[in-house]
Amino acid sequence: MRSSNPVFSRRGFSRDNGYAGFNAQQPQAGGPAVGTNPYAEGATNPYATNPYAQDTQLGAPQQVRGDVMTIDDVVSRTAMTLGTVVVTAALSWFLLPVDPANLGKSYGIAIGAALVAFVLAMVQSFKRKASPALILAYAAFEGVFLGVISAAVSTYISPGVVAQAVLGTMAVFAGVLIAYKMRWIRVTRRFYGFVMAAAIGFILLMAVNALFSLFDGAGDGLGFRSGGLGILFGVIGIILGACFLALDFKQVEDGVTYGAPREESWLAAFGLTLTLVWIYLEMLRLLSILQGDD
């Protein structure tokens, strides 16, 4: 099964063994039995091979590697990536003022940073291997964009909303993590298909709304980002972000279980950062609408 997160889609995750992320011939010690998937509902290929195995011939002995991905690797890389986002966002908040005299310049820098971050994210998504420098550069430019946007929202729309959005994002992350570890959330093919269909529909609607906003003097497009519809789509966006987190957790879990190379922890950090940025922006938008309606 492939993740909804684009950085996972080219990393050897397949559909060959039910719903497994990494199909394995010989998992690490303590992992599931050979050729099985603990979350599958009728897995059909007991001979699926591990794309990270040094020798994938059926029945051949497999050398144990010492450079496999661990949870500690994922946590440390994610902390570095998110830390870069937070530091550059804080610097942008203070160094790129959003007062009326400088608002246009700061917005221009923020939009430019967002475009650079998007390009870097796409380049990394299509690379065969993780590039820590590229991932950290993406995080830095993303932080510039978030810092300016957050400062503008806090200054002109809802003072104090940024701290609430950060806390809300942390709450969503913690809630999904607990639900996933308790197996209240089961990542299956049906779950994946539903999330992907919902995400495609959501993104298309937002794109159409943005297109219409170009011809709308009020900049509201079809009204999907304000009023009652804005609240509804804000909630949907956050729920989709939570679903992305569940898919990301599944991929990380499978990568650790089946011995993905340690460099894959950078991709896990990259994917989690993308998802958390999505959730934060949706949370910021939703809270701004709710406070603006008070």
Image (cartoon, helix red, strand yellow):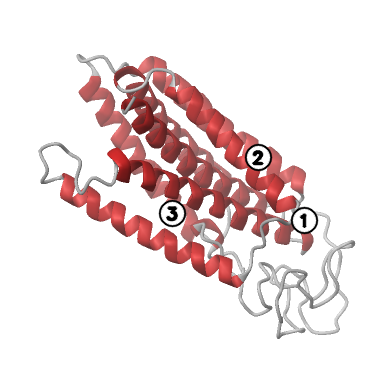
Compared with residue 52, is residue 202 higher up or lower down, i.e. above or below?
Answer: above
Q: Is residue 249 left or right of residue 206?
A: right
Place of residue 89 in the rendered image (x, y in percent of width and height, measured from the top left): 45, 26
Q: Residues within 10 Å of mark 1 (few under 14, many from 20)?
A: many
Residue 226 in view, yes or no = no
Give the percent coordinates (x, y) of residue 125: 48, 57
Q: Quadrant of residue 142?
A: top left
SS class, disc 2: helix
Residue 68 got which mark? 1
**Quick one: label 1 or label 2, which is nearer the N terminus?**
1
Q: Does 115 appear above or below 55?
A: above
Residue 284 lies, in percent from the top left, at: 42, 33
Spatial CA span between label 1 and label 2: 26 Å
Residue occupying image coordinates x 43% and y 24%: 161
Secondary structure of the residue carrying tag 3 is helix
Type of amino acid under label 2: Ala
| First in sequence: mark 1 vs mark 3 | 1
Q: Which mark is residue 123?
A: 3
Residue 269 visible somewhere in the drawing: yes
> Amino acid type of disc 1?
Val
| Residue annotated with mark 2 | 174
Asked whether 82 or 207 is in front, the reply is: 207
Residue type marked 3: Val
